């Protein structure tokens, strides 16, 4: 009996070591896509393409195997372009609540099957700030920062990825502006309701401060929305692994907008990955790419459907191969910019653009604002841009309530210098007060006693001098630490066509 027991345990250990380890569970991805053209009651501007951006993102995600729910109400032009859509409702509070509940149940079921789960939330529409709290508009109310925190927390996904193309979208996630500028907030405590506090959540926002976002008729959509779709359809996939991570996405957005010299026109984005992991994938494609390109002569090009929908823009660096995932619509048109030719893709089978012959094309472009946006995608994009982006630590803002290391150092220095100044001056004034008391108490004394009292007064006043000096020096140091320029930015002019500049960014926290 004892021999059988030993034999059983030997076999069990052998099976444990010899049997293959179970494969890692696939990531089950779910999405909530919202598009709302309608402005808040106090605004007058109605957006033209927020609904189109939502539809385009929904179709991209579905094509990538994501279970996506779409909340949108199409305007007349968009309904004519897209036709009937299997939407889950309108961008209204009740429909949002139902969609979140359905997604939460689907995520829970996937978790029970052993999958990691991810929720992708995309919003395109109006955004603003009220009493320090950011919000985006639904048709019948607001999706506030506090409500977004509750939504992301309720779904219980392993990770969340939030994309917001709206004015002042930064404040939908963060409770303060960049550079330590705090804003009054009358709602729930920031540490209990700020989405940026969620370590499992990444953000891509169309603004990095209190700024407006951009739509452009050439893209028929928001600038961020179009560039985001371009990246996710493979234009940012420099390592050709079929996945787009935050490093590739952030570097792609940075490179695409770098050539716009006027900061008033240049889109400004915020990219922050979950738990600071820039190599966290946002989306992954499977199987062979429908369209690859090994051409080195394309430069900046865009991909368009027969209905005139601009699917993506790309500008690969020399030698960079592309694997792209356009929609199944055929024909597709690949058009270099500027250029006089186009490449027509008719086959549904995977194809290399290098094997497609060019056809002639007539191109015309007009418009003042268009001239600025024509600079989008001017710089080629490749692995070097991803490495440069990863090495730029200032690309990732820290959560509100956790000041950057430089701010924490400066704040600690201010406290120390201020304390030293106050303590030294208090000691000096104490010594001066003691000298005054000795002086007044010696009134009426004999000559000998007066001389002794005067000596004590002089001794006390001399003793106070080092403390006054210490207080003054500490005060000067405190003032410099508080008002010294935050940074000195030097443009060396190494990039051809750029003007060399020298500028201060002054930091005043009062």
Image: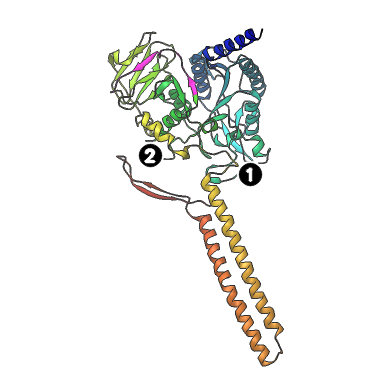
Residue under the point 58% across and 27% down:
38
Q: Is residue 461 magenta?
A: no
Callout 2: SS: loop
2 left or right of 324 in image: right
Q: Position of residue 397 (x, y in %)?
A: 52, 38
Tell me the tag on residue 169.
none
Residue under the point 70% across and 87% down:
443
Tell me the tag on residue 184.
1
- Disc 2 marks which residue? 261
State whether the magenta stretch is mostly helix, strand or loop: loop
Viewer-nearest residue: 372 or 258? 258
| Image position of 177 with respect to 378: above or below | below
Callout 1: SS: loop
Mark 2 / mark 1, whichever is N-terminal: 1
Q: Position of residue 58 (x, y in %)?
A: 52, 18
Find residue 100 and report its image quarter: top right
Viewer-nearest residue: 171 or 321? 321
């Amino acid at each position: 009996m004892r021999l059988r027991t030993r034999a059983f345990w030997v076999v069990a250990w052998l099976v444990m070591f010899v049997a293959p380890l179970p494969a890692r569970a696939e990531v089950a991805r779910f999405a909530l896509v919202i598009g709302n053209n309608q402005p808040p009651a106090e605004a007058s501007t109605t957006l033209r393409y927020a609904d189109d951006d939502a539809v385009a993102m929904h179709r991209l995600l579905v094509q990538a195997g994501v279970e996506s729910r779409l909340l949108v109400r199409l305007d007349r032009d968009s309904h004519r372009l897209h036709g009937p859509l299997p939407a889950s409702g309108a961008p209204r509070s009740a429909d949002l609540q139902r969609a979140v509940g359905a997604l939460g149940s689907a995520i829970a079921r996937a978790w029970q099957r052993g999958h990691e789960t991810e929720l992708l939330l995309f919003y395109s529409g109006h955004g603003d700030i009220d009493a320090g709290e950011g919000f985006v508009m639904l048709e019948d109310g607001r999706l506030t920062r506090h409500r977004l925190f509750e939504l992301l927390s309720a779904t219980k996904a392993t990770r969340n990825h939030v994309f917001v193309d709206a004015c002042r979208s930064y404040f939908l996630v963060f409770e303060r502006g960049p550079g330590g500028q705090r804003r009054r907030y009358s709602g729930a405590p920031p540490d209990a309701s700020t989405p940026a506090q969620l370590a499992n959540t990444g953000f891509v926002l169309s603004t990095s401060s209190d700024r407006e976002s951009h739509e452009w008729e050439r893209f028929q959509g928001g600038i961020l929305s179009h560039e985001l779709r371009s990246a996710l359809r493979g234009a940012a996939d420099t390592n050709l692994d079929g996945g787009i991570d935050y490093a590739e996405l952030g570097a792609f957005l940075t490179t695409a907008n770098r050539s716009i010299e006027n900061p008033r026109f240049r889109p400004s984005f915020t990219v922050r990955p979950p738990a600071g992991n820039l190599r966290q994938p946002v989306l992954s494609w499977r199987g062979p790419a429908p369209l690859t390109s090994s051409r080195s002569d394309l430069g900046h090009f865009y991909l368009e459907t027969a209905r005139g929908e601009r699917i993506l823009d790309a500008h690969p660096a020399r030698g960079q191969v592309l694997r792209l995932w356009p929609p199944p619509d055929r024909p597709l048109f690949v058009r270099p910019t500027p250029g006089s030719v186009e490449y027509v893709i008719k086959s549904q089978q995977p194809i290399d653009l290098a094997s497609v012959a060019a056809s002639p094309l007539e191109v015309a472009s007009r418009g003042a604002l268009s001239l600025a946006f024509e600079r989008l995608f001017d710089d080629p994009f490749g692995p070097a841009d991803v490495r440069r982006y990863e090495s730029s630590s200032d690309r990732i803002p820290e959560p509100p309530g956790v000041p950057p290391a430089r701010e924490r150092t400066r704040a600690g220095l201010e406290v120390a210098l201020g304390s030293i100044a106050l303590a030294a001056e208090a000691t000096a004034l104490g010594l001066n007060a003691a000298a005054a008391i000795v002086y007044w108490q010696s009134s009426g004394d004999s000559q000998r006693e007066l001389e002794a009292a005067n000596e004590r007064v002089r001794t006390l006043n001399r003793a106070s001098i080092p403390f006054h000096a210490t207080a003054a020096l500490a005060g000067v140091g405190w003032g410099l630490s508080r008002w010294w320029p935050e940074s000195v930015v030097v443009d060396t002019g190494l990039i051809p066509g750029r003007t060399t500049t020298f500028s201060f960014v002054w930091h005043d926290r009062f």
